[in-house]
Image (cartoon, helix red, strand yellow):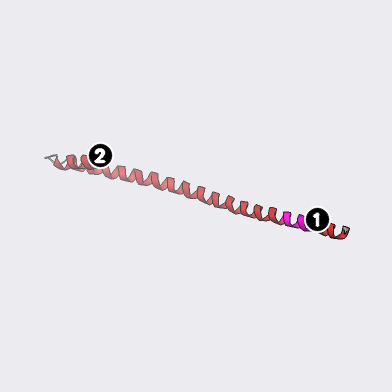
């Protein structure tokens, strides 16, 4: 009877240690996934800033070219489009 109880305790201990190991591995995987997502966020932020600057430069250049039109119709139309 004592021998069976001793084995039962060992089995429970093995079961608990296996559970802890599996949870640790899952946590480590999530840690690396979070790190990868943070790198993606940083890259996307840089891309967003670059695209925003590019759009603003294009708008500015278009408005500058349109302002050279003597009728002013093109510049008025562009201002209307860009305000929306």
Residue extending furthest toward the front: 1
Q: Nearer the viewer, residue 67 or 14?
A: 14
> Is 15 in the magenta?
yes
Residue at 47% x, 47% y: name it. 41
Residue for badge 2: 83
Answer few, some or many: residues within 10 Å of disc 2's Cα (few below 14, many 20 plus, some between 14 and 19).
few
Q: Nearer the viewer, residue 30 or 46?
A: 30
Residue 19: x %, y % from top left: 69, 55
Quadrant for the C terminus, please: top left
Kindly state the secondary structure of the residue where label 1 is placed.
Answer: helix
Residue at 31% x, 42% y: name it. 56
Residue 25: x %, y % from top left: 64, 55
Give whichever of discs 1 and 2 has the lower sequence position: 1
Residue 33 relative to residue 77: left or right = right
Tell me the quarter of the picture where residue 13 sits: bottom right
Q: CA distance from mark 1 to mark 2?
A: 73 Å
Looking at the image, is mark 1 or mark 2 nearer the viewer? 1
Residue at 38% x, 46% y: name it. 50
Magenta residues, start to end: 11-17
Residue 74: x %, y % from top left: 16, 43
Q: Nearer the viewer, residue 68 or 81?
A: 81
Tell me the quarter of the picture where residue 77 sits: top left
Residue 56 relative to residue 46: left or right = left
Residue for badge 1: 9
Answer few, some or many: residues within 10 Å of disc 1's Cα (few below 14, many 20 plus, some between 14 and 19).
few
Residue at 39% x, 44% y: name it. 49
Kindly report the secondary structure that dominates the magenta region of the rendered protein.
Answer: helix
Residue 51 relative to residue 22: left or right = left
Quadrant for the N terminus, please: bottom right
| Number of callouts | 2
Task: Please determine whether, in this image, residue 25 is positioned above or below residue 62.
Answer: below
């Amino acid at each position: 009877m004592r021998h069976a109880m001793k084995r039962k305790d060992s089995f429970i201990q093995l079961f608990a240690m296996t559970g802890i190991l599996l949870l640790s591995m899952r946590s480590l995987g999530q840690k690396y996934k979070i790190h990868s997502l943070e790198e993606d966020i940083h890259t996307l932020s840089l891309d967003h800033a670059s695209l925003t600057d590019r759009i603003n430069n294009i708008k500015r250049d278009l408005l500058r070219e349109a302002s050279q039109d003597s009728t002013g119709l093109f510049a008025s139309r562009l201002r209307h489009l860009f305000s929306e």
